[in-house]
């Protein structure tokens, strides 16, 4: 007898047959260079914990102290009774750290994009969007009901072309791009994109989720990396990666931030960041402002690991950041490679369609400042062993 959900079972089975079904492993330890995953201690090459802050003692202490003072949750949306002085402190600190006029925080980086794009453009407008932009940008664009015009990945000439082709067909326009592309580890040519945006008087927005705490002076991000302060209209970021906590931030011109407080739907209709999260984020800003040591170590680790992987014969794609994709091609191979790595004590997840295009499955290694050189060497040994066993390298 058929049911209303038979189609779901069929789709799930199809995913399994194609090697695209995601088996979600369970962590039983804090984040760090090593994890307990499904009861087994393994080297962590999966997390976005770039600076090792997710379990940093100062962040944990700040969260405890805030819990004792304020309790756990805000109990309301920001516009009714959910804005605490901690939220305003964090926003002021982030604005100063980023060198912008103002900042606003959201419950996640995903929500930050869902709030920002529909507040800036609507059905009479157009969005020029990099074809490899993150899912949260894509969903924000769809929610806006603006016309979406994609341009070839990181291709400024193609961006110029599509702008000229659509001239005069819209009320307002927005150019939006990731800063660091999370699957390939390449960087948007934001300096060149700014020149195009400026020439055509178009709002420019960058999602710097994987650049916060990684690029720029002491991790100040892609705008700092290209010395574009005051030129990029909107910077979106996340506090769940290098900052080690959770939450999203939008930074930029004061009038844009003021508008988001009035029209950013996740800000208006979903409860605020929790108290311990907010306090921990402030502690993360403290650490980044005090020293560049963690950012420096992250890059040292990344340079060492990537060079050694290339020496072994692995294809690491076009990455110029600590994100290190190990290109394998087909999803079943990537999943088998991931299983073999786990058997060899390394936790590195396979990534396939729809996260990346078909035929471009990979293991994405996320290097961290939490790793010591001995950790990286152990990981390299495991990759070499599995790579030879599966015929990926000779």
Image: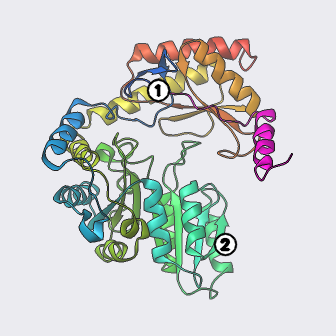
Residue 232 in sight: no
Query: Residue 200, image x and y in percent?
Result: 52, 79
Q: CA distance from mark 2 to mark 1?
A: 47 Å
126 above or below 382?
A: below
Mark 2 lies on a secondary structure that is helix
x 77%, y 42%: residue: 9
Residue of label 1: 27
In the rendered image, residue 349 lying in the magenta stretch gets the answer no
Q: Nearer the viewer, residue 383 or 119?
A: 119
Mark 1 lies on a secondary structure that is loop
301 above or below 12?
A: above
The segment highlighted magenta reads: 1-27
Query: Residue 390, image x and y in percent?
Result: 74, 16
x 21%, y 37%: residue: 291
Residue of label 2: 161
In the rendered image, residue 11 lying in the magenta stretch gets the answer yes
Kindly indicate the quadrant of the structure image that contains residue 356. Answer: top right
């Amino acid at each position: 007898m058929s049911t209303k959900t038979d189609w779901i079972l069929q789709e799930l089975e199809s995913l399994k047959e194609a090697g695209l079904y995601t088996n979600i492993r369970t962590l039983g330890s804090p984040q760090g260079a090593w994890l307990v995953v499904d009861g087994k201690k393994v080297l962590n090459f999966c997390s976005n914990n770039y600076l090792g802050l997710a379990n940093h003692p100062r962040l944990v202490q700040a969260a405890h102290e805030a819990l004792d003072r304020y309790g756990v949750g805000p109990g309301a949306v920001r516009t009714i009774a959910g804005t605490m002085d901690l939220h305003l402190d964090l926003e002021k600190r982030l604005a100063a750290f980023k060198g912008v006029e103002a900042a606003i925080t959201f419950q996640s980086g995903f929500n930050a994009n869902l709030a920002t794009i529909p507040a800036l453009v609507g059905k009479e407008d157009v969005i020029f969007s990099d074809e490899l932009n993150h899912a949260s940008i894509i969903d924000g664009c769809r929610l806006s009901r603006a016309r979406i015009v994609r341009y070839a990945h990181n291709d400024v000439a193609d961006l110029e072309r599509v702008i000229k082709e659509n001239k005069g067909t819209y009320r307002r326009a927005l150019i939006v791009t990731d800063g660091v592309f999370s699957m390939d580890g390449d960087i948007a040519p934001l300096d060149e994109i700014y020149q195009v945006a400026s020439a055509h008087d178009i709002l420019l927005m960058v999602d710097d989720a994987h650049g916060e705490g990684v690029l720029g002076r002491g991790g100040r991000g892609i705008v700092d990396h290209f010395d574009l302060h005051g030129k990029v209209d909107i910077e979106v970021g996340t506090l769940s990666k290098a900052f080690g906590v959770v939450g999203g931030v939008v930074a930029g011109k004061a009038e844009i931030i003021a508008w988001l407080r009035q029209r950013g739907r996740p800000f208006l209709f979903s409860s605020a960041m929790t108290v311990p999260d907010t306090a921990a984020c402030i502690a993360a800003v403290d650490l980044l402002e005090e020293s560049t040591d963690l950012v420096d170590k992250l890059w040292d680790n990344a340079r060492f690991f990537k060079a050694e992987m290339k020496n072994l014969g692995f294809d690491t794609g076009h990455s110029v950041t600590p994100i290190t994709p190990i290109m394998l091609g087909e999803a079943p191979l990537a999943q088998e490679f991931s299983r073999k790595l786990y058997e060899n004590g390394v936790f590195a997840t396979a990534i396939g369609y729809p996260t990346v295009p078909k035929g471009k499955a990979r293991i994405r290694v996320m290097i961290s400042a939490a790793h010591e050189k001995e950790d990286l060497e152990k990981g390299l040994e495991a990759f070499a062993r599995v790579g030879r066993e599966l015929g990926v390298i000779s």
